[in-house]
Amino acid sequence: MKPFNIYLIMLSILLMCSCTTSSQDHKKISTTQQAVKPTVRIYIQPFTDLPASYLTYISNEFQKTFKKVIINPRVNLPVRSYYPARSRYRADSLLSFLGRQTNDGCHTIGLTTKDISTTKGKNIDWGVMGLGNCPGKACVASSFRLKGKNPMEKLYKVAIHELGHTEGLPHCLVQTCFMRDAEGQDNTDQETGFCAACKHRLIQAGWTFN
């Protein structure tokens, strides 16, 4: 075989080895650069009025979605959040209270049976089932306006809705989605889960679903 042909063969082998190594290195780099999803840490803050059965049910449901669910000791609703003119608790004030005790990267959901309210447009004291910072660290859910059967399940749906807001999810137009806008009504019986679009965003944020 001519020396020139041998040279070409050797050069081809070297190039092939070089390409193979480069491809493997690229895969390693790509794997290393993939963003590691954070472990979503949820703190449940039960207020003293919440029945134990409600707390047990909701914490069990949360554990189907979140790897880290911590139940804080019960505390009284803060006196400064009380609105005596309507015998309610101001939800925005409760969010401030909950937010102060929540570390960055975590979320706290306050649970109560008491009536809560917030300012909505020209209505300075609008009764709500829940409220959450969007995005933010804190949210609160109340069973006061939830009537009919399955009150624990309904409160869970309100709570998971508000936690969705803390991840930055807006209200959803899908009628069966947990992120549906209540518009002053209890529509929880029609909600069956997160729609595909909302669920996709939450999975990207580190939520898991069984």
Image (cartoon, rainbow, N blue to C red):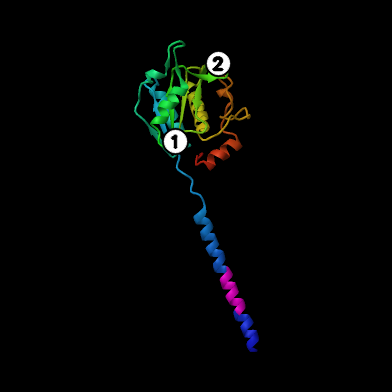
Q: What residue type is labelled 2?
A: Asn
Residue 170: image location, x then y, percent = 57, 31
Mark 2–mark 1 distance (CA, rounded to whole Å): 37 Å
**In the rendered view, would you say 24 is above or below 50?**
below
Tag of residue 63: 1
Region in magenta: 11-19
In the displayed structure, does residue 4 sit left or right of residue 150? right
Q: Residues within 10 Å of mark 2 (few under 14, many from 20)?
A: few
Q: Which of marks 2 and 1 is nearer the N terminus?
A: 1
- Outermost residue toward the bottom in this view: 2
Q: Is mark 1 on a helix, strand or loop?
A: loop
Can residue 127 be seen in the rendering of this structure?
yes
Q: Which amino acid does label 1 sit on?
A: Gln
Residue drawn at (62%, 27%) of the image: 175
**In the rendered view, would you say 17 is above or below 66?**
below
Nearer to me, 100 or 25: 100
Image quadrant assignment for residue 198: top right
Image quarter of the N terminus: bottom right
Q: Does the magenta stretch include residue 37?
A: no
Nearer to me, 123 or 187: 123
Nearer to me, 209 or 129: 129
Tag of residue 171: none
**In the rendered view, would you say 205 is above or below 165?**
below
Residue 136: image location, x then y, percent = 48, 33
Mark nearer the viewer, 2 or 1: 2
Tag of residue 123: 2
Image quadrant assignment for residue 82: top left
Residue 4: image location, x then y, percent = 65, 86
Q: What element carries label 2?
A: strand
Type of secondary structure dominating the magenta stretch: helix
- Outermost residue toward the top in this view: 85
Residue 6: image location, x then y, percent = 62, 85
